């Protein structure tokens, strides 16, 4: 029997180059070997965006980009979190066994409180419980997450094991972080501040849906410096970021060419950025074309989301039925 992989992405933003060469490339491989559930976390997004401007559109965009990146709805289950109400029901049950102290100690919660002290809601506090339920509802054992989510995954194991102890059952399995590669691909941002991510702003990200014109403008505005002053000088982080991006999307010959120019103190960053932009455009063209085609195919998207909801609901309904039985919730008629 195949092990189950569960992963979700919040519906509040578009997928970027970091997602594509990191998580999404792994997802495409995983669906060949595992029972995969990939969901769009629209409920999660409400913890920080309680009044979204156009939630259905952003959910639709993520579905399109999942498909364009190569996730096959016949091999995997692609679904919208809110289409499976059993998740919210399990969230209610598990909240009864989650303690205030452990939730307040969560690193992500403390970070959010510091960043947005006027938006500390109950959903934000119990975010780890909802995340745990997304995994437990399908009995996931493998979860592709980065280091920033490892604590949430540890809490998932805590909640699942606590449920087992409370009701003296061996029901929920433990879930662990999972990746196809020993070393996760790190895609740096264009702003020189670590990895590419939406939290650093749109200017830092190359989105999969960005047009060639937008990609050129973003890359040409990428942070750089005045250039090396000594032969074979060590690159500062902002410059190393540009070369790291080139390693991902450019040919070895192109990379070697600009490495030599840098080491000889003859590099022109404008030329490097122009080349990098064109290589990014070529690298993302297959996905971008698919995004454009899928965005215009409403019938196919409805079919995909409906199929995903049905497959996810079948799995979730079984879990809720069994959880109710374990807890002792039974109808009296």
Image: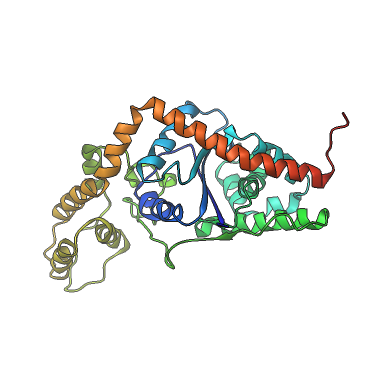
**Residue lying farthest to the right in this orientation:** 332
Asked whether residue 42 is in view, the answer is no
Q: Residue at x 70, y 58 (%)?
A: 158
**Which x, y percent locates residue 248?**
28, 58
Picture mark count? 0
Q: Quadrant of the N terminus?
A: bottom right
Q: Is residue 24 visible?
A: yes
Q: In screen coordinates, is 309 left or right of 252?
A: right
The chosen color scheme is: rainbow
- Can you give x and y, in whole percent of width and height, for residue 138 in the image? 62, 48
| Residue 134, position as x, y percentages in the image | 61, 45
Compared across the picture, whether 39 is left or right of 172 comes to: left
84, 203: nearer the viewer: 84
Give coordinates of residue 99: x percent, y percent.
Answer: 76, 50
Quadrant position of residue 247:
bottom left
**Is 116 situated left or right of 228 in this image?**
right
Query: Please, is residue 70 above or below residue 59 in the view?
Result: below
Of residue 44 and residue 140, the one placed in the foreground of this image is: 140
On-image quarter of the C terminus = top right
Q: Residue at x 48, y 46 (%)?
A: 76
Q: Where is 168 relative to 67, above or below?
A: below
Residue at 45%, 52% (x, y): give it.
31
């Amino acid at each position: 029997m195949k092990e189950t992989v569960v992963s979700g992405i919040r519906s509040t933003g578009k997928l970027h180059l970091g997602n594509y060469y990191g998580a999404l490339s792994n997802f495409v491989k995983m669906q060949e070997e595992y029972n995969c559930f990939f969901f769009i976390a629209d409920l999660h997004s409400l913890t920080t965006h309680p009044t979204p401007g156009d939630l259905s559109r952003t959910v639709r965009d993520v579905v399109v980009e999942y498909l364009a990146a190569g996730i096959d709805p016949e091999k995997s289950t692609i679904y919208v979190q809110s289409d499976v109400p059993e998740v919210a029901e399990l969230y209610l049950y598990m909240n009864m066994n989650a303690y205030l102290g452990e939730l307040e100690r969560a690193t992500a919660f403390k970070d959010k409180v510091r960043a947005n002290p006027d938006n500390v809601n109950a959903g934000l506090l119990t975010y780890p419980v909802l995340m745990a339920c997304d995994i437990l509802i399908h009995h996931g054992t493998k979860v592709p997450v980065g280091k920033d989510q490892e604590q949430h995954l540890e809490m998932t194991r805590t909640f699942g094991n606590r449920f087992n102890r409370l009701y003296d059952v061996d029901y929920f399995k433990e879930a662990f972080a999972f990746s196809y590669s020993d070393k996760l691909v790190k895609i740096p941002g264009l702003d020189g501040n670590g990895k590419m991510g939406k939290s650093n702003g749109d200017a830092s990200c190359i989105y999969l849906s960005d047009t060639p014109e937008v990609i050129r403008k973003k890359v040409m505005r990428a942070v750089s410096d005045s250039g090396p002053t000594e032969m074979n000088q060590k690159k500062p982080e902002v410059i190393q970021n540009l070369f790291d991006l080139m390693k991902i999307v450019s040919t070895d010959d192109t990379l070697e060419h600009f490495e030599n120019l840098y080491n000889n103190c003859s590099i022109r960053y404008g030329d490097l950025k122009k080349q990098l932009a064109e290589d990014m455009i070529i690298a993302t063209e297959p996905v971008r074309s698919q995004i454009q085609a899928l965005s215009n195919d409403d019938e196919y998207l409805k079919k995909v989301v409906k199929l995903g909801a049905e497959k996810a609901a079948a799995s979730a309904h079984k879990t809720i039925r069994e959880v109710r039985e374990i807890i002792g919730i039974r109808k009296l008629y």
